[in-house]
Image (cartoon, rainbow, N blue to C red):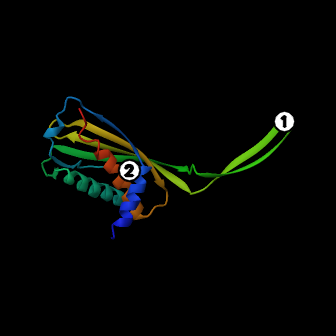
Amino acid sequence: MKSLPFFILSIFLVSCGATVAVDYDKQVDFSKYTTYNYFPTIDSGLNELDDNRIIQITDSLLQQRGFVQSETPQLYINFYARESISSSRNTIGIGIGSGGGNVGVGVSGGIPIGGNVLNQQLTMDFIDTEKDDLVWQAVAEGEMKERTTPQQKEAYYFSVLQKILAKYPPKK
């Protein structure tokens, strides 16, 4: 029962959430990769709490798919984010109009509601440790309110990472 609000919130965020673009090396056989670990020096641009959220969610999603975290991995995972703040696109419109004959005059304006929005571009790289080559990359663009609770952040990252990892391995 404790996870029901988290589940409902994650469904809501998935339905209106991030868009994901993927690029990969077509010459690579992705079926050979079964072990992973994180790049030794991740500099994500996020705070440590968000880094830990992303790592825990990624671990959970990858291990559900049969991947094993290893000290001698076949893949290194690196992630980083770029963020910007913008005003909410939700507005209340106010208009004044007048017209008579063949002349019309109108004035309108919008008052932003909902506060500022954090636009985030999260990039996840999979690097072949043997060749030291980038073999797969996903870029997710999404947004969340500037002031969110830890539970909302966790639900947001869960939905974004679920969308990212749904595209791995790439379909031939």
Comes first in the chain, label 1 or label 2: 2
How many residues crowd around disc 2 within 10 Å: few (fewer than 14), some, or many (20 or more)?
A: few
The residue that label 2 is drawn on is 45
Q: Residue at x 42, y 54 (%)?
A: 13
Q: Is residue 110 above or below residue 4?
A: above
Nearer to me, 124 or 61: 61
Residue lying furthest bottom in this view? 1
Mark 1, residue position? 103
Q: Specify the quadrant of the image occupied by residue 9.
A: bottom left
Query: Is residue 11 shown to the viewer in this render?
Result: yes
Image quarter where the N terminus lies is bottom left
- The picture places residue 133, in percent across and down from the top left corner, at 22, 35
Residue found at x 38% / y 44%: 140
Outermost residue, front side = 101
Label 1: element kind: strand
Q: Quadrant of the C terminus?
A: top left
Residue found 35% across the figure and 47% down from its top? 80
Mark-to-mark CA distance, 1 and 2: 55 Å
Instruction: Say which amino acid is labelled 2.
Output: Gly
Question: In this orientation, which residue lies closer to the viewer: 166 or 34?
Answer: 166
Q: Position of residue 130 (x, y in %)?
A: 14, 38
User: Residue shown at 32%/58% (left/top)?
Assistant: 53
Q: Position of residue 104 (x, y in %)?
A: 81, 38
SS category of the residue bearing label 2: loop
Can you name the residue that lies furthest to the right here?
101
